[in-house]
Image (cartoon, grey):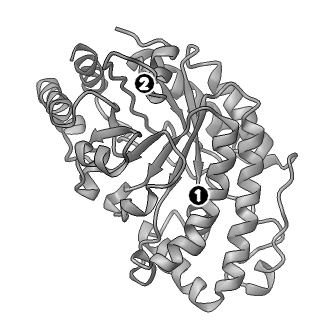
Amino acid sequence: MTFTNKQVLDVMLQRQQETTIPFSVWHHFTKNEFFDGLKYPEGIETSLSGLEKYINDVNPDFVKLMTDGFFHYPFHGVKDLNNLTELKHLKELTNDDPWITGQVELINRQLKVINGKTAFYNVFSPLTYFKWALINWDSSKLNEADSKFAKLYARAPQIVVKTLESMSRGIQLLVKTMAKTGIAGIYYSTQTIQDPSLRNNKDFFVNVHRQVDIEISNVADQSFKVNILHICGFDGFQNNLSWFTDYPYKVVNYAVNAEKVSLKEGKELFPNRVILGGLDITKEGILYKGSTDDVEKTVTKLVQDAGKDRLIIGADCTIQRDTPVDNIRAARNTVHQI
């Protein structure tokens, strides 16, 4: 069984009468997704060839287009983000910035190799881009980025907020420009700062984090009929999911296994939204280490427990690069047969 683009969008927009369930998972195609795509175009070529092979091997019902090569926000005029004097003079992005035009070119090339499938392009929250820019990805752990962001915010909250607002405007330009491509919408990835000083700080979330997220999300909502909200639980990170319930997205994806919140509970937490996910992304998860029979049983139980309405089966986040293709196919086929 293969879903048409109309069937996928009907599910996401809740236009369908029957309870059909689409399926999709995704992963990176280069060894390190943090390469600079403007400096190392060979990384882009590797990603494109990997994407084309993956689509032909797996045949997902829709595609999340990866941002590999553009994980680094261009902090023009700033050499050191810890230099507050420099940070105050961050230059705004323009429509012709290579970081924007390069991603538009990437999208157009990605669309050519996915056999006409419905596609959503990944966009990160300003907080994610900011915190990642504070660490060396070759030697640092993920949570070090959150700690460094929290320390910088404690030193100069007003400067950090103004920086995030500038970044938000740049990302809004990106989203508006992408609306001219053939993608169906964006896959907006956001995550609460994991440092203990900010993780449960609702004032910070509402007045800083949510503020810039919503500005971008509103532009996306005006630019596309459907977008996907990804509340990222990669590497076991956790979020207060209830803080995101008023974000304007028709589809919500969160880390079921990291958050310990089932798909059924997600439907209750996000009423009138379609919930995407369910499968563990770790090397201990069934999709990675289980047999095809294990995968079939796991997927069947996910659907039985959640109910078929407002549901898309996928994963908590990006799956392992070497996840067995047979297991991915088994998950897809099982979903389609339910």
Q: Position of residue 41 (x, y in %)?
A: 70, 39
- Report the residue at 60% width, 19% height from top: 113
Q: Would residue 57 be found to the left or right of residue 84 on screen?
A: left
In terms of image quadrants, where is residue 180?
A: top right
Left-right relation of 229 to 97: left
Above or below, 266 against 149 in this view is above
Residue 131 visible somewhere in the drawing: no
Considering the numbered disc 2 on the image, is that residue within a helix, a strand or a loop?
A: helix
The residue drawn where x is 61% and y is 91% is 155
Residue annotated with mark 2: 11
In the rendered image, which quarter is residue 167 located in? Answer: bottom right
Q: Of residues 183 and 274, which is closer to you in this image? A: 274
Q: Amino acid at mark 1?
A: Ser
Please, is residue 191 above or below residue 3 in the view? below
Residue bearing mark 1: 125
Q: Is residue 101 left or right of residue 146?
A: right
Task: Identify the residue at horizontal 54%, vertical 18% (top origin).
Answer: 117
Residue that appears at 76% across and 74% down: 79
Q: Quadrant of the N terminus?
A: top left
- Can residue 294 be seen by looking at this rendering? yes
Q: x, y percentage for residue 319?
A: 36, 41
User: Could you tell me how far apart the alpha carbons at marks 1 and 2 are, in whole angstroms?
Assistant: 26 Å
The residue under label 2 is which amino acid type?
Val
Which quadrant of the figure contains the C terminus?
top left
Q: Secondary structure at mark 1?
A: loop
* Crowding at mark 2 (Cα within 10 Å: few <14, some 14-19, many 20+): many
N-terminal of the pair, mark 1 or mark 2, is 2
